[in-house]
Amino acid sequence: MKKVSLLLGIHMHQPVDNFSEAVDEAIALSYGPFFETMAKYPDFKFAVHCSGWLLEQIRSKHPRIFSDMKMLTQRGAIEWITAGYYEPVLSAIPSRDRQAQIGKLNRYIKKHLGTVPQGLWLTERVWESSLVPDLHASGIRYAVVDDYHFLSSGFDAAKMDGYYETEEGGYPLALFPISQPLRYAIPFFSVERSIDAILQYAKEEDSAAIIFDDAEKFGLWPQTHEWVYEKKWLEGFVEAVLEHESIETQHYSTYLEQQRSKGIAYLNNTSYFEMGEWSLRSEQTLALEALKEQVGTDYFDRMGVAFIKGGTWKNFFVKYHESNYLHKRMLSYSVQQENLKKSALESLYKLQTNDVFWHGVFGGLYLPNLRDNAYRYLLEIERTQAKKKIAYRVADIDMDGFEELKVLSKSLSTVFSCRWGGQMVEFGSLDALFNWQNTLMRRKEAYHEKILHPKEAPTVQKDEPDGDAIATIHSSSNRIDETLKAGLIYDWHPKHSFIDHFSPNPFDMETFRSASFHEAGDFANQPFELDAQTHTFTRSGGIHLDRKHATDLTKRYLFEDDGITLDLSCYSEYEGELYYGMEFNLHLAHPHLALLNGQKIGEGLCSSGLDTLSIIDTFTQKRVTLTCSRICDVSAYTLKTVSQSESGFDTVAQQISLLFSCPFRSKLQLKMKLEVSDV
């Protein structure tokens, strides 16, 4: 049998400033035992990529593990692979930030491990050809992508056993296609079946079996710690590879030096197939799944993969306006980074960490702590920009074609949107480094179909003592909790603050919670005009009942260092009784602990005859006070979203929703004051 070069790599990453218990679990179950095992076999050559922040954590807090990593590097076992230090999706950040982030990780690896990476791990395998010149400028000779990148670009599945060359503007880069069959086999198949999977690539003398995958599969994924370490799968696999006469472990850079490429390649802008599905709107994702099923697995695997595909990674900025807003706030400082202090520049790089900008089956944007961290880095930058005098700026920050009013005082960073009803879309404390407007809409996701219309779970092979394999996360099933259905409520407007509602009926808790009240106005999700001099938003809209009744709404904001005052006036041709509601949505780290006028929200609370509402945020130790010039009814509930994670379906408490409501006829004037103070 011909020999095959095994190019094996592992990728290690944790979101910057992730919960310490999550990082500790990954280290205890996966990273630690992996390197402890591999330290016994310094002749086994493999590649490692570890994001910079995680590498820092391991070196400073787990020196024994780092010692194993360093020893294996010095013995020639490990080849280090680079990427952006804080694990950004490189195509989503500007050119100079790409080079800066790669350079930062290269320097760290050189300083602490004594080697300079030649290869690059492509974060989330998001490929765009525009990356090539920046990778070349960073000293990168090759990158690893999925075989799917090649197959979806029309390449032959039988020729994924080596590397290809590409270029952009004359700058060259080698590309290694990661084998999907090997990713699904290792470490889930038995040692014997895993060896057989590798030998499938022993076609020519220069063939390579290429795998580069998440280290978390080796211990952190369900069932894998017992399988990989307690049942000694990893030891058995390494020994079997080292003893096999037809398999040679090699570094990617060595293979690149010794073997010729398989030719030139130009790839689509893409990631892995599932990422393309996730980035689509829910209806499109379901249609794509149905199309795959219609054409059949055989055709899809052979030919359809080149024609049937989802969207690009940047579609997440279209799908989730919350992600787009955060991303564009980052870009707004990236383009003016010459004016940033060194500490603020570091905060900018942390803000570029990829995890918060998208959502698949690992939480992402839906995880409040990731969004809190991202806004903390943004507010760290804002704090360096704050002056004694309140600063105002009008610009299309989120690049949606509508201007925003940005206001920066000594205490607060706030932003108001023309596109979305003159509403507040950012409400950040420069003291607490916390954004109370870090909110999410409840929106339909494709995986909600599994809750609404659950199918019988497939039979999954169990891990018996002499079993041939264990289930991967891709084949495992989750029981559907019927109570989740009640949480599938979808909003028809973003969950900002200072939202204007009009109804012919009094507002009540249940219709407010379910977003099912009769909305008669066209102000909650429609554009307003901005007078930048007076900070006034206006809309000539209507009350839509038997017909459209012309209605004008004016919102003028006044600003202090620690507060905002809204002067609102409304004039309508409709002469019947209407009910006005002003909605606020405030994100809290622990919304279930928040006190509203001394009461916990619980399942929701309603109060009549109020003009002041005091919210105590136990996390920031701040008091947010809302004072209205009119006596109002107030409804409040804890808004929850149903999202998917690797462990199944999660109901996450994201924020509290508040509604101040009062009746009026034809003319309405009120003043609302929002203040922040220490508890």
Image: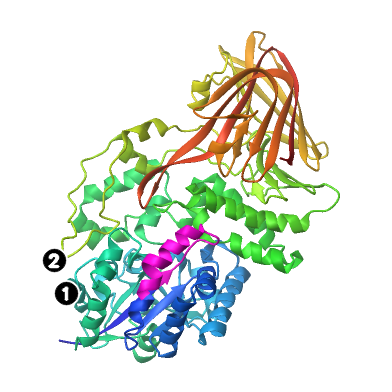
Q: Quadrant of the C terminus?
A: top right
Q: Which residue is mark 1?
A: 192
Work out whether mark 1 precedes mark 2 in sequence or the reverse, and give the earlier one: 1
Q: Which residue is mark 2?
A: 466
Identify whether 626 is placed above or below 175.
above
Return the residue nearer the eye: 439 or 357: 439
Q: What's the amino acid at mark 1? A: Glu
Residue at 26% across, 50% down: 292
Q: Residues within 10 Å of mark 1 (few under 14, many from 20)?
A: few
Is residue 659 shown above or below 364?
A: above
- Residue 302: x percent and y percent? 22, 62
Residue 268 pos. (x, y %): 41, 64
Label 2 sits on what residue type?
A: Asp
Estimate the x, y position of residue 613 in percent, counting from the top left. 68, 28
Indicate left or right for 382 with 291 as reference: right
Q: Is residue 104 magenta?
A: no
- For the record, the magenta segment spans 11-34
Which one is nearer the viewer's eye here, 96 or 166?
96
Q: Residue at x 29, y 74 (%)?
A: 160
User: Where 37 sits versus 528, above or below?
Assistant: below
Answer with left or right where residue 250 lies relative to residue 501.
Answer: left
- Provide the secondary structure element on which disc 2 rests: loop
